[in-house]
Amino acid sequence: MSREDFNQKTILVKDIMARALISVNPVTTSFQIAKMMEQGGIGAIIVKENENPVGIVTDRDFATKIAANSLPFETPVGEIMSSPLITINADSPISAAAEMMSSKKIRKLAVTENNRIVGIITSTDLVNQLAK
């Protein structure tokens, strides 16, 4: 795939996003989240309050918030999550996801379809697609 293909807007977010999702409530501890990420081999978990998505916790949140500030592992994820949750529609072209990640300086976007979170797309997904 060439850069021109990437910009042609023919590949959609839903074509390359990860559909496996884990979600937790804001009082889940950072330690519990870290174990979930390790066991699931994932780098992000959606935080929901009353079934409504309110944020995301990423592996980067651990480095920049827990480790850098020496916060205890019992810290609730509601205190370290990135919020508000930034989303993109599953039918958007991947170029729109790349532009959004770049402008917002983030590496992961929650993907929505019919106002529900259905997946996550990451900067790694975009790079892997570009490299094909």
Image: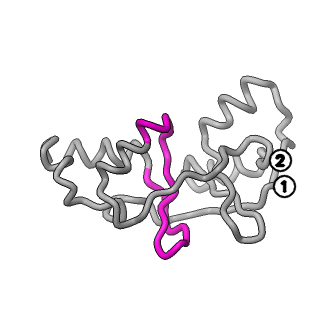
Q: Residue 17: within the magenta?
A: no
Mark 2: which amino acid?
Pro
Mark 1: which amino acid?
Val
- As drawn, is 27 to the left or to the right of 20? right
Q: Nearer the viewer, residue 51 or 19?
A: 51
Q: Is the residue under label 1 in contact with that under label 2 (CB below 8 Å)?
A: yes
- As drawn, is 117 to the left or to the right of 124? right
Can you identify the residue that label 1 sits on?
27
Can you identify the residue that label 2 sits on?
76
- In percent of width and height, residue 56 lies at 63, 51
Where disc 1 sits, the SS reads loop
Q: Which numbered dot is residue 13?
A: none
Q: Nearer the viewer, residue 72 or 26?
A: 26
Examine the rendered structure and indicate whether residue 91 appears above or below residue 29: below
Mark 2 or mark 1, earlier in chain = 1
For label 2, the crowd category at 10 Å Cα-Cα, with few meaning under 14, some 14 to 19 and many 20 or more, is: some
Q: Nearer the viewer, residue 32 or 3?
A: 3
| Point 68% across, 36% down: residue | 62
Where disc 2 sits, the SS reads loop
Which residues are drawn in magenta?
Answer: 101-121
Q: Residue 120: within the magenta?
A: yes
